[in-house]
Amino acid sequence: MIKGGVAILDFGSQYTQLIARRVRELGVYCELLPGNCEWKEVEKLAPGAIVLAGSPYSVYQQGSPMPPDDVFSTKLPVLGICYGMQLLAHRTGGRVEGGHHREYGPASLNTRTSMLFDGIKTGQQAWMSHGDRVTQVPPGYTVVASTDLLPVAAMENTALKRFGVQFHPEVNHTVFGTALLRHFLFDIAGLRANWDMKYFSTVAKQYIRDELGENGKVILGLSGGVDSSVVAALLHSAVADRFVPIFVDNGLLRAGEREEVENTFKEHFRMDLVTVDGEDRFLSELAGVSDPEQKRKIIGRVFIELFEEAANSIPGVTHLAQGTLYPDVIESVSFRGPSATIKSHHNVGGLPERMNLKLLEPLRELFKDEVRELGTELGLSRRMVSRHPFPGPGLAVRILGPVTREDRDLLQKVDSVFIDYLREKGLYDEIWQAFSVLLPIRTVGVMGDERTYDRVVALRAVTSTDGMTADWYRMDPAHMAAVSSRIVNRVKGVSRIVYDISSKPPGTIEWE
């Protein structure tokens, strides 16, 4: 859908997605491609510059990922980072060796007068993470930076506009990293900062109209989460008269969520929202089921059945929209081997084929933070676009053991008290995801002069950037005490609160 910008070739470094995020933060569009892709895949993007990213491999190692030969003959500006620098040296007449001093962590970078470091002071901190090193630069290149342990920390060929850095400018620990990337993108490559959500919104709306043609009609499984809400706002803005969102209330949502969805999309946006009340059906099918995977399968099956019934009552539907995001796409095209399918949105997996509809994924170029920005651009409230992630099966996987209406009601109340407290104290936006888990145990407590035997609730709060890894949120003990007291006092049937201090890995964010 988008052309131009930067092609970033991915060779498996843990930092590759971070490069893309930094480039986009500077207002330049970019895409990640498998490092060993064919050149025609690069040409499809029509980039104005190429970045060769890092890798855990050695360039001289058999089977290490190699880019297409055209990378080394292109007239486009090229920046090689870590492994990318070693590729430039290895493939154009230089030498790369292992067995020398390794460098991991901060290092003081001694720079020389050069095109790459123009305007950047010498002696600043750079972040190193490498075992191999360039010991001889290729013909036409000059050494433009070093450290106490590394004679060749950066090199450049100004005639060809090819540059290599052994450090990682994309990480915050490289204090001048953003300045260097900005200089490469704008001053050297001559790119423009024209990537923002206002621009994307315009392009995406035209893409939607082109995909639907004159007579197409699109439906969406609206869950109330950030991604589907932003898709709904975008589709409504693009083709309001040919878009119908379908909201299936499975009875396992957060307290007040159905009302919030209907108020936002039906009342505020005036969308032709179809609401399916599936609470009784879902709870009936889940009765007595404890196994979390079986819960998920039941919820997925029932959702598809109810969604399909609603969709079949809408005439002329040709497309099904889905909230696929860019990290899902990246996961499917990594050089390490594509996954079987791009990760499906929890609400619509398998539906396009089953219903013989074309799939529409208008957010597939965006990271999560960009989706939130787009939602604001489209008029969604900050409260909605900043919501924490919520699992497709909803509270069913936060009630450990069989799901009952009584336990659902209890957990909704607990979770509402917890989240309201975080918002009230200004903690909500510091946390990636926070929620409550109802445990299948009871514990003795004391309420006034009486002994009780009531439920145990676990509170979970984590910090993360993408949900792939997460650390537990270090909540101030004073807040822990206050929220615990508030829950026990306001929710009858709970006598004990615990706080989860597990990180991912080894744990997961959700309990089931």
Image (cartoon, grey):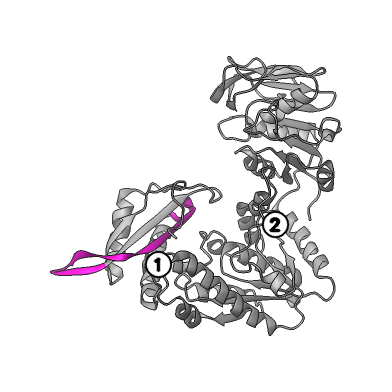
**Is residue 196 found left or right of 45 in the rendered image?**
left
Point out the image quarter for the N terminus. Answer: bottom right
Residue farthest along the front direction in this orientation: 62
- Kindly tell me whether residue 110 is visible in this rendering: yes
Circle 1 SS class: loop
Q: Which mark is residue 305?
A: none
**Is residue 375 found left or right of 195 in the rendered image?**
left
- Kindly tell me whether residue 236 is visible in this rendering: no
Q: Which mark is residue 364?
A: 2
CB of mark 2 within 8 Å of CB of mark 1? no
> Where in the figure is residue 21, as x and y percent of width and height?
65, 44
> Where in the figure is residue 157, as x and y percent of width and height?
80, 22
Main secondary-structure element of the magenta-colored stretch: strand
Point out the image quarter for the C terminus. Answer: bottom left
Circle 2 SS class: loop
**Is residue 358 found left or right of 128 in the rendered image?**
right
The image quadrant of residue 357 is bottom right
The image quadrant of residue 223 is bottom right
Residues packed near mark 1 inside 10 Å, few (<14), some (14 to 19) or many (20 plus): many
Above or below, 266 against 12 in this view is below
Q: Nearer the viewer, residue 219 or 330?
A: 330
Does the magenta-highlighted stretch encompass residue 435?
yes
The image quadrant of residue 203 is bottom right
The amino acid marked with disc number 1 is Ile
> Where in the figure is residue 31, as x and y percent of width and height?
73, 46
The amino acid marked with disc number 2 is Arg
Which stretch appears magenta? 427-454
Q: Look at 63% across and 69% down and name the residue there.
A: 348
Task: Tell me the residue that label 1 is attached to.
Answer: 399
